[in-house]
């Protein structure tokens, strides 16, 4: 074998050794096998073996003619050192091998000799041509297929040059050179990925970065996912048409997300504005709510540090309620609306079911808005009162009040004002008390409230007494423990007066109670508020009478509903109907109750106060 070549151990392709050192690992370009370059072969040993084979098996069909003369130059190239060539020739000439050579190796040696004999004709021809001074270089793939092909020496030389191992740089540049000649996108990508593999396993001075080739892949195939990912790109998947489905660098992706967030905010703002606009205009009721909103926005604009949020036509705040809640961090306005709204709605439902058809002069959830303004605390309400509403009552011990005044009569009749901060039981009782005034006003025949003090305050106390909450549900018309001590004192005072034969004292008989008109009641309240000057005695008398009107008004309604299974309930409902139509009078009240003489009134008074001392005492002891 030529010591200037070596073969791939896997496929047999031979290569020129050149300056490549023995032991260096290379990859076969044909089969991709990685192997070490073998050491240089000993030509003398190889030639000795050749002579041995020639001597054992002369060419078939040839005589034992004289050997062709061997040139000095040829023998100098092929002759081994020492006397090995001479002994080999002697052995070949005699046709015999020494006994030691024939016996060595046993059976394995015989098989080897047989193999060598099969190659003898070819090797003999090579030896003869070599002796004649002709040098032949043979490349074989080891498969037997290529060795049978015919071709010119120039083509054989070209194949040898092509199969010579290339440096990584040569391999890389060769792959890039093929890209321009490749027709298909997939083929170009394969070549460029192969070039990247060369870069990743080898390095040379000035070698490009794999990123550069990934970018070339994207020039060929802009949507190549592997190249994008290798370059650190991210695909934008959010619902934003400007960037949707695009591959972006980290910085581009960050900016795109910022744009998307701003775009989303703008869309949400636009949608909220559309919803807001629609909810104020979708029907007649909503248009009235807008009228109320517009007035109160203007109203609070004069009040420092006061803004409102509006809630209506939602499950927690159903029609006709319209809640205007102070916009504050604490308490949260939406939470306030969704906590108070269900209680007001429950009261309205219970109130409507509490009376038979025909009692209410007007009852329509669409005709009027029922506005409620809710302040975060009493201080905030006082701020509102002092800036344009000095005629409103001060907070005192209350948590709410109702005014029948309306600046938009076609939209609403009056406003319920509420300020938070009181204890829960007190807060809800006062809110429901004032909300009942609002219900009575909205049930009236026209824009004015009913004029009867005991009925108006008594019915507000009756419905203001409640049990439960938004989670467990509400029940109204409960026994009012807070008013019972006043009732008990009045009942005891009546009994003492009765025994003493007196008809007056620290009490109001039903006849006294039902005959107090609105003018007298408002005068007493003005004396108590200081709006009308009064003597200490007048103030004391006014205070006791007003307190009795509230307490006995509730007690008389409770009596009508509960005495002997509701003996006077129907009479009370008729009085409510009269008051809502502005037709209440003492005479009509007496007629409904069946009172024709003073004796009838005296009997009614005894029944009422005995009920207060016995039945109501039992209710007070068992919790109502």
Image: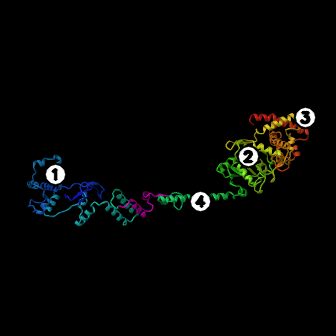
Does residue 284 appear anywhere in the picture?
A: no
Other-residue count near label 2 (Cα within 10 Å), few / some / many at <14 / 14–19 / ≥20: many
Task: Point out the tag, 3 or 4, that comes first from the N-terminus.
Answer: 4
Q: Are marks 4 and 2 in contact (CB under 8 Å)?
A: no
Which quadrant of the view contains residue 26?
Answer: bottom left
**Residue at figure coordinates x 74%, y 36% from the top left:** 623
Q: Nearer the viewer, residue 270 or 353?
A: 270
**Residue at figure coordinates x 81%, y 34% from the top left:** 613
Where residue 408 appears, x then y in whole percent? Answer: 76, 57
Tell me which segment is drawn in magenta.
207-236
Marks 1 and 2: which is nearer the front?
A: 2
**Disc 2: which residue:** 399
Q: In the figure, is residue 54 to the left or right of 225?
A: left
Q: Are marks 3 and 4 in contact (CB under 8 Å)?
A: no
**Residue at figure coordinates x 78%, y 43% from the top left:** 461
**Disc 4: which residue:** 266
Task: Point out the tag, 1 or 4, that comes first from the N-terminus.
Answer: 1
- Queried whether the magenta region covers residue 221, the answer comes back as yes
Up-down: is 184 above or below 537?
A: below
CA gap, disc 2 to disc 3? Answer: 42 Å
Where residue 207 appears, x then y in whole percent? Answer: 35, 61
**Disc 3: which residue:** 501
CA gap, disc 1 to disc 3? Answer: 158 Å
Q: Nearer the viewer, residue 395 or 447?
A: 395
């Amino acid at each position: 074998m030529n010591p200037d070549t070596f073969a791939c151990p896997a496929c047999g392709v031979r290569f020129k050794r050149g300056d490549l050192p023995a032991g260096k690992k290379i990859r076969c370009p044909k089969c991709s096998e990685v192997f070490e370059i073998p050491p240089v072969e000993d030509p003398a040993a190889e030639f000795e073996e050749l002579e041995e084979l020639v001597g054992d098996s002369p060419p078939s069909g040839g005589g034992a003619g004289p050997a062709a003369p061997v040139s000095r130059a040829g023998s100098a190239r092929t002759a081994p050192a020492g006397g090995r060539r001479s002994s080999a020739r002697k052995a070949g000439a005699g046709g015999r091998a020494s006994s030691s050579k024939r016996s060595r190796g046993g059976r394995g040696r015989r098989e080897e000799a047989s193999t060598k004999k099969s190659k003898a004709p070819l090797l003999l021809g090579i030896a003869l041509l070599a002796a004649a001074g002709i040098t032949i270089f043979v490349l074989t793939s080891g498969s037997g297929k290529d060795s049978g092909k015919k071709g010119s020496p120039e083509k054989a030389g070209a194949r040898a040059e092509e199969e010579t191992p290339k440096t990584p740089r040569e391999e890389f540049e060769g792959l890039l050179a093929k890209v321009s000649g490749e027709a298909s996108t997939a083929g170009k990508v394969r070549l460029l990925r192969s070039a990247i593999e060369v870069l990743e396993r080898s390095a040379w001075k000035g070698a490009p970065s794999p990123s550069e080739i990934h970018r070339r892949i994207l020039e060929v195939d802009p949507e190549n996912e592997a190249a994008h990912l290798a370059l650190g790109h991210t695909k934008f998947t959010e619902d934003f048409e400007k960037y949707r489905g695009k591959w972006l660098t980290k910085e581009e992706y960050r900016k795109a997300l910022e744009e998307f967030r701003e775009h989303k905010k703008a869309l949400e703002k636009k949608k909220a504005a559309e919803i807001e606009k629609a909810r104020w205009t979708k029907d007649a009721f909503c248009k009235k709510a807008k009228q109320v909103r517009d007035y109160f926005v203007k109203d609070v604009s004069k009040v420092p540090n006061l803004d409102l949020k509006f809630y209506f036509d939602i499950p927690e705040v159903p029609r006709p309620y319209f809640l205007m809640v102070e916009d504050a961090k604490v308490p949260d306005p939406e939470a306030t609306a969704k906590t108070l709204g269900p209680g007001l709605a429950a009261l309205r439902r219970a109130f409507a079911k509490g009376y038979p058809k025909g009692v209410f002069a007007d009852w329509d959830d669409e005709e009027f808005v029922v506005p409620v303004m809710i302040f975060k605390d009493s201080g905030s309400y006082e701020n509102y009162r002092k800036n344009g509403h000095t005629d409103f009552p001060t907070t005192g011990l209350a948590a709410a009040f109702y005014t029948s005044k309306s600046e938009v009569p076609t939209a609403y009749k009056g406003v319920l004002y509420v300020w938070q901060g009181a204890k829960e039981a007190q807060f809800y009782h006062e809110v429901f008390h004032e909300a009942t005034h609002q219900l009575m006003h909205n049930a009236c025949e026209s824009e004015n409230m009913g004029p009867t003090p005991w009925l108006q305050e008594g019915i507000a106390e009756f419905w203001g007494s409640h049990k439960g909450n938004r989670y467990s549900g509400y029940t109204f018309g409960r026994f009012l423990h807070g008013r019972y001590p006043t009732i008990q004192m009045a009942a005891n005072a009546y009994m003492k007066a009765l025994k003493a034969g007196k008809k007056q004292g620290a009490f109001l008989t039903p006849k006294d109670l039902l005959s107090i008109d609105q003018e007298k009641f408002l005068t007493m309240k003005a004396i108590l508020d200081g709006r009308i000057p009064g003597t200490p005695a007048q103030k004391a008398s006014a205070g006791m009478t007003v307190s009795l009107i509230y307490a006995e008004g509730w007690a008389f309604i409770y009596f009508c509903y509960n005495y002997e299974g509701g003996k006077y309930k129907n009479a009370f409902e008729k009085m409510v109907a009269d008051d809502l139509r502005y037709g209440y009078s003492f005479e009509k009240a007496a007629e409904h109750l069946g009172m024709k003489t003073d004796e009838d009134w005296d009997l009614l008074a005894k029944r009422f106060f005995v009920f207060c001392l016995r039945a109501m005492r039992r209710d007070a002891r068992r919790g109502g």
